[in-house]
């Protein structure tokens, strides 16, 4: 982005008017936040138990951390918004939105106790009759093969 400051440059030749100054602004990308206009996006890793049971999550904002309630049953990649936590509008019309995207973090190295607990969970999951996402997926597969 370039900003022009009129009349603040060097003096002109032979006593002519002062020239303009051009300031070039470069913004370094942030490691945590992604900006789109006045809106900001941040990804927050969550565990399966937090997604399933819900939790209170501390979310970083430009103004400092805020507490957010993660509802029970939150699906991976759920996007929630925090109004007025984005960038201020250059024309003074409020602030943008901070979008929080919840990313399910699956552990890679499990202890024996953790594996045992997940195996118990797997047995409970076999008993679940109502799985709307799986049902929708299976319906789409049937339609695809019956073309």
Image: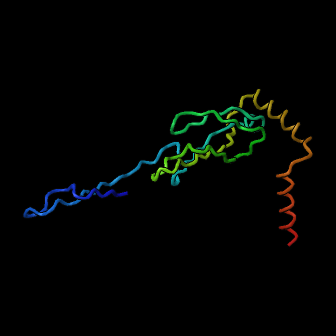
Which residue is at the front of the view, 129 or 22?
A: 22
Left or right of 53 in this view: 18: left
Q: What is the count of numbered marks?
A: 0
Q: Quadrant of residue 114?
A: top right
Residue under the image location 71 percent in, 46 percent down: 76
Question: Which residue is at the front of the view, 128 or 126?
Answer: 128
Q: Is residue 100 visible?
A: no
In the rendered view, does 80 fall on the left or right side of 10?
A: right
Q: Residue at x 45, y 52 (%)?
A: 90
Q: Is residue 50 left or right of residue 99?
A: right
Q: Residue furthest top?
A: 113
Q: Quadrant of the N terminus?
A: bottom left
Q: Which color scheme is applied?
A: rainbow
Residue 109 at what x, y percent from top left?
68, 34
Tell me, yes or no, if residue 50 can be seen here: yes
Kindly identify the residue that appears in the image at 34 percent across and 58 percent down.
2
Q: Position of residue 46 (x, y in %)?
A: 67, 37
Q: Name above or below for residue 2 compared with residue 51.
A: below
Residue most toward the front?
92
Instruction: Using the image, determine if residue 78 lies above or below residue 68.
Output: below
Residue 27 location in percent, x, y? 41, 49
């Amino acid at each position: 982005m370039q900003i022009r400051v009129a009349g603040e440059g060097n003096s002109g030749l032979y006593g002519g008017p002062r020239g303009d100054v051009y300031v070039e602004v470069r913004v370094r990308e942030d490691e945590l936040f992604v900006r789109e206009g006045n809106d900001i996006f941040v990804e927050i890793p969550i565990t399966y138990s937090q997604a399933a049971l819900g939790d209170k999550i501390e979310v970083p904002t430009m103004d400092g951390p805020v507490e957010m309630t993660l509802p029970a049953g939150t699906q991976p990649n759920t996007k929630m918004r925090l109004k007025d936590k984005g960038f201020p509008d250059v024309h003074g019309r409020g602030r943008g939105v901070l979008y929080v995207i919840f990313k399910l973090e699956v552990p890679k190295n499990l202890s024996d106790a953790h594996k045992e607990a997940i195996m118990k969970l797997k047995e409970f999951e076999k008993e679940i009759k109502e799985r709307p996402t799986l049902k929708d997926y299976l319906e789409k597969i049937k339609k695809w093969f019956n073309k």
